[in-house]
Image: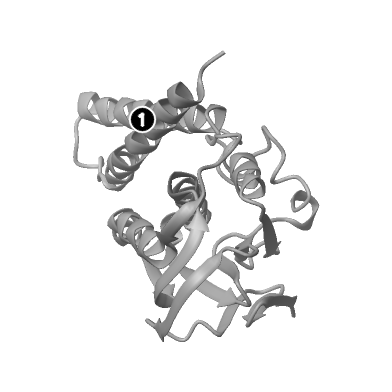
């Protein structure tokens, strides 16, 4: 049985691996192979498959090393979110995806920084996959109400079929990305529950999605000078729309 220190080292290593691997995979996805000869096209395809396998391995390591007793401490949650947003923008720009942040410039909260980053990075990657090559937008919103932290990751991607909403947090379940590992959202749920919170999702097929992470009694200090108006978020599509007003999510 691995010790907590060994699990922490494994988790940090896997976390450090994933971001550069995601950048490499994103770059390979954008390579125009139409002008290449057969050997180079096969090489690029093999490189992409290898990058995808390494990403899956990193995700598997991260999930297997979820800390049973998270190390909650005072961190600037807004700073953590902006850093994750900046990282995903490097990939999103090549995919014609606009990534926006709306929220306070400073929000000190009690979180496990490593685990919180893991959840947000995973959700941002899921949104990017949902948008695919058609492009679109991802909006990350950070709110604080009565000491509770709300983190929304919204996109106008392919959405989730109603029959899948109750399954997406099950281990091994995957949708949309058939090359996915099916472990991401299950790991996210476990992490947030270990922090005393929960994750909610509102979506419909072809109508985008909002994933909301809720952490009660976590906020310590908040600077209300927001980068943008985080009060109303709307995700809409052909079939339905979802709107957030303050701390409620209402399907329309």
Is residue 118 toward the left or the right of residue 251 in the image? Answer: left
Front position in the image: 204 or 41: 204
Colour convention of the picture: one colour
Picture mark count: 1
Answer whether residue 219 is visible to the viewer in this image: yes
Front position in the image: 162 or 85: 85
Is residue 148 toward the left or the right of residue 46 in the image? Answer: right
Up-down: is 55 above or below 29?
Answer: above
Up-down: is 94 above or below 240?
Answer: above
Residue at the location (47% across, 68% down)? 140
Answer whether residue 154 is visible to the viewer in this image: no
Q: Quadrant of the C terminus?
A: bottom right
| Residue of label 1 | 13
Residue at the location (54% across, 62% down)? 157
Q: Secondary structure at mark 1?
A: helix
Percent of width and height locating residue 29: 33, 44
Residue at the location (67% across, 48% down)? 193
Res. 227 image quadrant: bottom left
Q: In the displayed image of the protein, which residue is found farthest to the top?
A: 1
Up-down: is 116 above or below 152?
Answer: above
Percent of width and height locating residue 44: 27, 31
Front position in the image: 2 or 117: 2
How packed is label 1: few (under 14 Cα within 10 Å), some, or many (20 or more)?
Answer: some
Q: Quadrant of the N terminus?
A: top right
Percent of width and height locating residue 53: 42, 26
Res. 108 image quadrant: bottom left
Percent of width and height locating residue 218: 57, 63
Is residue 19 toward the left or the right of residue 166 in the image? Answer: left
Up-down: is 120 above or below 71?
Answer: below
Res. 92 image quadrant: bottom left
Residue at the location (44% across, 22% down)? 6
């Amino acid at each position: 049985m691995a010790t907590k220190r060994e699990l922490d080292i494994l988790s940090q290593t896997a976390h450090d691996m994933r971001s550069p691997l995601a950048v490499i995979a994103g770059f390979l996805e954008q390579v125009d192979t139409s002008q290449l000869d057969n050997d180079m096209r096969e090489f690029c395809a093999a490189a992409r498959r290898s990058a995808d396998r390494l990403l899956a391995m990193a995700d598997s390591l991260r999930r297997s090393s979820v800390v049973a007793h998270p190390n909650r401490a005072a961190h600037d949650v807004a700073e953590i979110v902006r850093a994750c947003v900046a990282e995903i923008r490097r990939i999103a720009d090549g995919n014609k995806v606009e990534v926006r942040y709306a929220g306070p410039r400073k929000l000190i909260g009690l979180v496990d920084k490593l685990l919180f980053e893991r959840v947000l990075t995973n959700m941002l990657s899921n949104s990017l996959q949902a948008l695919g090559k058609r492009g679109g937008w991802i909006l990350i919103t950070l709110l604080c109400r009565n000491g509770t932290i709300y983190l929304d990751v919204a996109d106008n991607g392919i959405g989730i079929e109603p029959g899948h909403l109750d399954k997406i947090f099950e281990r091994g379940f995957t949708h949309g990305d058939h090359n996915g590992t099916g472990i991401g959202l299950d790991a996210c749920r476990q992490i947030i529950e270990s922090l005393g919170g929960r994750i909610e999702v509102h979506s419909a097929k072809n109508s985008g999605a909002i994933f909301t992470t809720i952490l009660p009694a976590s906020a310590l200090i908040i600077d209300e000078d927001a980068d943008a108006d985080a009060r109303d978020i709307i995700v809409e599509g052909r079939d339905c729309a979802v709107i957030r007003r303050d701390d409620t999510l209402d399907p329309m």
